[in-house]
Image: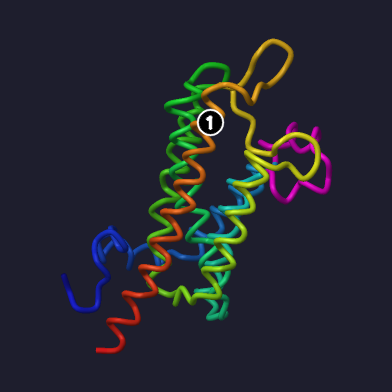
Amino acid sequence: MAADRPPWYLAPLPRQIEDLALRLVVPIALINLVGTAFGFWYYRFQLASTEILAWPLVPDSPLATMFIGLSLLAFRFDYDADWLHVLGFMGAFKLGFWTPFVQLFLNGPGGIALWLYVFLVTSHLAMVGEAFLVHRYATFSIRAVAVGVFWFGLNDLVDYFVPIAGEIHHTWLRAELVTGGFSHDVLAHDLAAGAAVTLTLVATFLALSTRIDELKRTSG
């Protein structure tokens, strides 16, 4: 391992891929923000049936693409916002894995257009790659990581355990569809919740590990 590189599990992308992506940072960021707009459209029916108070906690993936898109733009224009970078990293990592897991192993391809199903899986997996660009420009300060843990921990809490308005607020799962609506008493709900909490914990571990690795490398 090169002295200026984190261990592979913190920086799995080849350096050349990172360099290319950071040269294309503006178009990549704009693609994410377009994806955010599409995501809000995708969530339109769920938002319409949700109390306005809970709206910021419903569209998890659109917010994740917004965070990573704004993080990339902040890097490009030299804006110091480590909290935003951590939100971008944790959101892209968490939702980048959670959505393909749910689509492939819980929802399946039924009840949705094939092109949209493939798009949801592949576009979210691409978010994981974006997450592993953030170590190139963020410091992952403890305060910033605390912001990320608070936000995504709160999301898990209200998504699966303690709603703040009406029912719990996780993304509607086709696997939860029963006669008359959605049921949160099925196994798919528990698996989705377990995956979300696990990914929040893993993202937290990676963020803190990146901070520790940076301190070790800069201190000699």
- As displayed, is residue 22 above or below residue 125? below
Residue toward you, 29 or 3: 3
Numbered disc 1: secondary structure: helix
Q: Residues within 10 Å of mark 1 (few under 14, many from 20)?
A: few
Residue 110 position within the rendered picture, expressed as x and y whole percent measured from the top left = 52, 16
- Location of residue 61 in the rendering, given as x and y in whole percent from the top left corner: 58, 46
Specify whether residue 43 is painted magenta. yes
The C terminus appears in which quarter of the rendering? bottom left
- Quarter occupied by residue 172: top right
Seen from the viewer's position, the closer of residues 25 and 53 is 53
**Quadrant placement of the N terminus:** bottom left
Q: Is residue 80 above or below residue 100?
A: below
Q: Residue at x 60, y 46 (%)?
A: 156
Quadrant hosting residue 19: bottom left
Q: Position of residue 76 (x, y in %)?
A: 50, 74
Q: Which residue appears farthest toward the left when viewing the image?
A: 1
Residue beneath disc 1: 190
For this rendering, which residue is in front, 91 or 216?
A: 216
Give x and y (percent) for residue 8.
24, 61
Please tell me whether the stretch drawn in magenta is mainly helix, strand or loop: helix
Closest to the observer, 185 or 127: 185
The amino acid type of the residue labelled 1 equals Asp
Query: Residue 152, relative to residue 183: is it above or below?
Result: below
Give the left or right position of residue 34, taking residue 108 as reference: right
Seen in the picture, residue 52 relative to 72 is either above or below; the reply is above
Q: Residue at x 52, y 25 (%)?
A: 188
Residue pictured at 76% horizontal, 46% vertical: 55
Please tell me which residue is depicted at 61% across the width and 23% down the height of the picture. 185
Which region of the structure is painted magenta?
41-58
